[in-house]
Image (cartoon, rainbow, N blue to C red):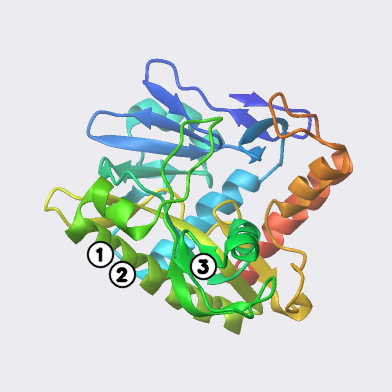
Amino acid sequence: MKYDKNHALLECSIPGVPQKSGKVRDVFDLGDKLLMVVTDRISAFDVILPSGVPDKGKVLNQLSLFWMEFLGMKNHLITANVDEYPEVLQPYKEDLRGRSMLVKKVKMVEVECIARGYLTGSGWKEYRSAGTVNGEKLRAGYENASKLDEVLFTPTTKAAIGDHDEAINYDQTVGIVGAETAAKLKEATISLYTRAAEYARERGIIIADTKFEFGMDDDGSLILADEVLTPDSSRFWPESSYAVGSNPPSLDKQYVRDWLDSINFNHQPPGPELPDEVVARTREIYIKAYEDLSGRKI
C-alpha cells in the first residue's frame, strides 16, 4: 500500500493477485470474482493528479453502496464486509475496510450511460453553439443550468486512461450494443436518475447529471456495475445556491478543476501537486456530499 503525507491511499497492491488500475480504482482478479478498491487518487481533465484526497475513496465506495441499496436494481455486489473476504485478502483488511467491495464478474457494456436533468457542462457548450446535445435538437430558450423539459440520455464511448470519452447519439449506441440493449440502457439510465434526483432534492441537493455503467449478467439481464451516483460520476449542486444562468458551487471535484484552471494548468499530464488547503477543502466537499445524501457519517 502506498500512502501520501496526508495518509491518502495512492496505490493498493496485493502480492500474488493479478491487478488492473484505473484512474481511481485498483481492481484485483480473484478468479470467479473481483475485488474493487477505491483509492484516494483524484483525476481532473482525465489527468491523475499526484496528490490524494484523504477518505475520498471511502466516500465513493460507501456512497455507491448506499445507492445500490436505495435503488434496488440488480447489481454486481457480493459483499463489502472485509471480514467475509477470502483468506488471501485478510492481511490487508484494515487498508481495505470502508473503501472496497467484492463483486461478480460481469461482461461490461461498451458505452457509458449519462443522464442529464439540467443543461450544463459540455451539454451547455454544445447547445450554445448548435442548439443540440449529443446531436439531439433542443428547443430554444434554455440558459446555463436550466432544468431540462425531460431527462436526456446522452451516452459516450469508453475511452482508455488519458483519452477523452466521445459523445455518441442513440443511433450510434444501437450500432455498438444493438437495438434491444440500447433501449434497456436508456430506460434504466433515465429511471435510476429520476428516482435518485427526486430523493436528493428532498435532501437539498440537485443532481444535475450522472454517469452509470452497466454489465450483462449470465442470464442476459442488465446489471448495475462500477460506481453509482458519486461525486466523481455526478454533478451535485446544493439547492440553496442554485440559480439559472450560472453553475452553483458543486459538491464534487469541480473545486479542483477550478483551482487547476486558476493556475493555467494545460489539462495535460503530468498534473501539479495540490496545496494542502485545496486537498483539505476537497475532502470537506466529498464528505458533505456523502453525509447530506446518505444521512450517515463516513
* Residue 28 sits above or below residue 128 on the image: above
Q: Residue at x 72, y 53 (%)?
A: 254
Dot 3 or dot 1, earlier in sequence: 3
Label 2 – label 1 distance at C-alpha = 6 Å
| Marking on residue 116 | 3
Q: Position of residue 239 (x, y in %)?
A: 70, 78
SS state under label 1: helix
Q: Position of residue 102 (x, y in %)?
A: 36, 42
| Marking on residue 187 | 2
In this view of the protein, can residue 22 be seen by the observer?
A: yes
| Marking on residue 183 | 1
Q: Nearer the viewer, residue 236 or 245?
A: 245
Left or right: where 207 falls relative to 69:
right
Residue at the top extreme?
16
Q: Residue at x 37, y 21 (%)?
A: 17
Label 3 – label 2 distance at C-alpha = 13 Å
Q: Position of residue 10 (x, y in %)?
A: 63, 29
Which quadrant is the N terminus positioned in?
A: top right
SS state under label 2: helix
The amino acid at mark 3 is Arg
Left or right: where 75 falls relative to 1:
left
Label 3 neighbourhood size at 10 Å, few (<14), some (14-19), many (20+)? Answer: many
* Residue 125 sits above or below residue 144 on the image: above
The amino acid at mark 1 is Ala
**Is the C-beta separation of discs 2 and 1 under 8 Å?**
yes
* Residue 189 sits above or below residue 242 on the image: above
Label 1 neighbourhood size at 10 Å, few (<14), some (14-19), many (20+)? Answer: some
Label 3 – label 1 distance at C-alpha = 17 Å
